[in-house]
Image (cartoon, rainbow, N blue to C red):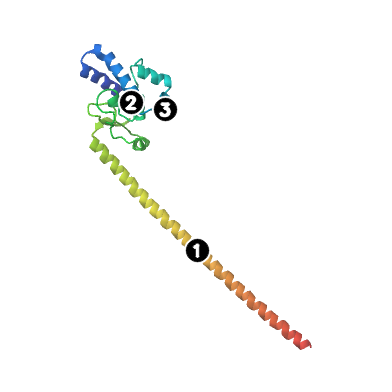
Amino acid sequence: MLIIWAKWVILVKNKDVKGDTMKQPEEYRAIAQRIKQRRTELNLSLQDVADMTDMSKSTLQRYESGSIRNIPLQKLGMLASALQTSADWILGWCKKPDDIPPVDADFRKFIRSLGFEIQAWPGYKSNIYLHNSDIGHAPITKEEYEQFRDSMVAYAEFNASNLLQKALERDHARISEDLQKLEKFVEYMKQTKEERGKDSNVEGGESSSGSSGMV
């Protein structure tokens, strides 16, 4: 549903920006040129990008030549990530290739594990979209995203720190207990050795006395 909706946004925006469907082929050529330009700037080969995006070299070549005009949204996102830019820049909706919406890949994976998707798909202001299949989807601001991300990270760090502290205390207690057991065992062995030494001396004395009496 999100992909269909986003493609609709792209179509509407293309119409709004140009206002003339006769100019769309020029837009496609410009997109192809930007993809190749960015790859060349980063000194990446087609194979490098293919490895990073799980796309074939032939598909990438067709993107760069403009023979494929409709890039699936998911592939657009992967391509933008590999080229260290934003989908907005590839589509010509922002001027700088380093104008990358602030969506951290690791945080995105974490949110996905909770049943949510968070992506910076193309939009008039590089909007960030939060999506859940049961609830729906809506754009959130950069400030909302950063506050959400930072609070989740802080919460995770707090709990991880507490968990580690408890684990360390438990481990230290276990080591201390093991040391006490070892000390008791060493003391026991020492006492046993001393008692055996005393017993040996007593037996030796008795043996000597018996020998003297016999003489």
Crowding near the residue tagged with mark 1, few <14, some 14–19, many ≥20 C-alpha atoms within 10 Å: few
Residue 205 occupies quadrant:
bottom right
Residue 213 occupies quadrant:
bottom right
Q: Are marks 2 and 3 in contact (CB under 8 Å)?
A: no
Crowding near the residue tagged with mark 3, few <14, some 14–19, many ≥20 C-alpha atoms within 10 Å: few
According to the picture, the residue beneath numbered tag 3 turns out to be: 48
**Residue 140, how many percent across, how many down?**
24, 33
Specify whether residue 37 is in view: yes
At horizontal 22% and vertical 29% (from top left) the residue drawn is 125
Secondary element under disc 2, as helix, strand or loop, is helix
Where's the C terminus, which quadrant? bottom right
Question: Looking at the image, is mark 3 or mark 1 nearer the viewer?
Answer: 3
Question: Looking at the image, is mark 1 or mark 2 nearer the viewer?
Answer: 2
- Spatial CA distance of label 2 from label 3 is 13 Å
At horizontal 72% and vertical 82% (from top left) the residue drawn is 207
Secondary element under disc 3, as helix, strand or loop, is helix
- Spatial CA distance of label 3 from label 1 is 55 Å
According to the picture, the residue beneath numbered tag 1 turns out to be: 179
First of labels 1, 2 by sequence position? 2
**Residue 82, how many percent across, how many down?**
36, 29
**Residue 144, how many percent across, how many down?**
24, 37
* Front residue of 115 and 33: 33
- Spatial CA distance of label 1 from label 2 is 62 Å
First of labels 2, 3 by sequence position? 2
Amino acid carrying label 1: it is Leu
Seen in the image, is 63 located left or right of residue 13? right
Where's the N terminus, which quadrant? top left
Q: Which mark is residue 156?
A: none
According to the picture, the residue beneath numbered tag 2 turns out to be: 38
First of labels 3, 1 by sequence position? 3
Above or below, 22 relative to 140: above
